[in-house]
Image (tube, rainbow, N blue to C red):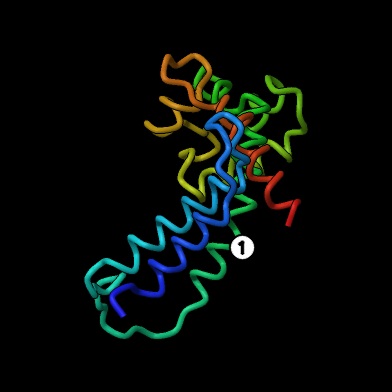
Amino acid sequence: MGESLLTTLKIDLFEAAPRLPFKAVPLRYILVVLIIRSLAYEVNMPAIPATPAQPPTEASPFRLFEAINAFQLTEAIRSAIELDIFTAIGTGHTTAQAVATHCTIAERGARILCDFLVVNGFLRKSGNQYSSNEHSAKFLDRNSPAYLGSCTGFYLPMIYGKISAI
């Protein structure tokens, strides 16, 4: 047997797919080809461990809580961008009350959201004064030429659409 099972599988799937003009190829065929090609690369790779060997550690729920918190962090960042909290802080509205007034939201909500962003490293806090870190100031303040906040309008609907389709 000169051919491997994977080669046979690839040939069978490619032969089974109808040959349409390039512009008319359905997306599902392209995805199948990409998945098969990625499998071929994975199978043909030398036997190298996927992750470096690490010394055994005590079991910890950290990764679980980190994964669960990921959705909350995404929503907090999206909300802060939509409310212009990073821009408000960048223009000198540095207390929860000033942020709330500038963004026309409740002071308690502004404080809770800003504190959550502090805990997750998107803002800094000293006393009752909030400030942007270098990353937030550069990428999340609308007054920055490198502003990337608008990408949430592009990426998040794609993610939520795929999740809701499951």
Q: Mark 1 highlights which residue?
A: 68
Could you say which is closer to the camera, residue 155 or residue 149? Answer: 155
- Of 49 and 47, nearer the camera is 47
Q: Residue at x 54, y 54 (%)?
A: 32
Residue 25 in view, yes or no: yes
Q: Position of residue 110 (x, y in %)?
A: 68, 36
In which quadrant is the C terminus drawn? bottom right
Q: From the viewer's side, name the closer residue of 112 and 156.
A: 156
Tell me which corner region of the image, top left, top right, bottom left or bottom right, holds residue 37: bottom left
- Which of the 4 image quarters holds residue 27? top right
Is residue 134 toward the left or the right of residue 85 in the image? left
Picture residue at 46% right of the left edge, 39% below the top? 124
Q: Badge 1: few (under 14), some or many (20 or more) residues near its Cα, within 10 Å?
A: few
Tell me the SS state at disc 1: helix
Q: Is residue 59 above or below residue 65?
A: below
> Residue 5: where, in percent of width, then height?
40, 74
Residue 102: x and y in percent read 68, 19
* Residue at x-position 56% and y-position 29%: 23
**Placement of the N terminus among the 4 image quadrants:** bottom left
How many numbered badges does the structure rendering display? 1
Where is residue 130 shown, x and y percent of the image?
51, 34
Q: Let me know if residue 126 appears in the view.
A: no
Please tell me in which quadrant of the rendered image residue 48 appears.
bottom left
Residue drawn at (70%, 23%) of the image = 103
Say which amino acid is labelled 1: Ile
> Relative to 143, is 98 on the left or the right?
right
Position of 86 compared to 163: left or right? left
Q: Is residue 72 above or below residue 1?
A: above
Query: Of 55 and 89, which appears nearest the observer?
Result: 55
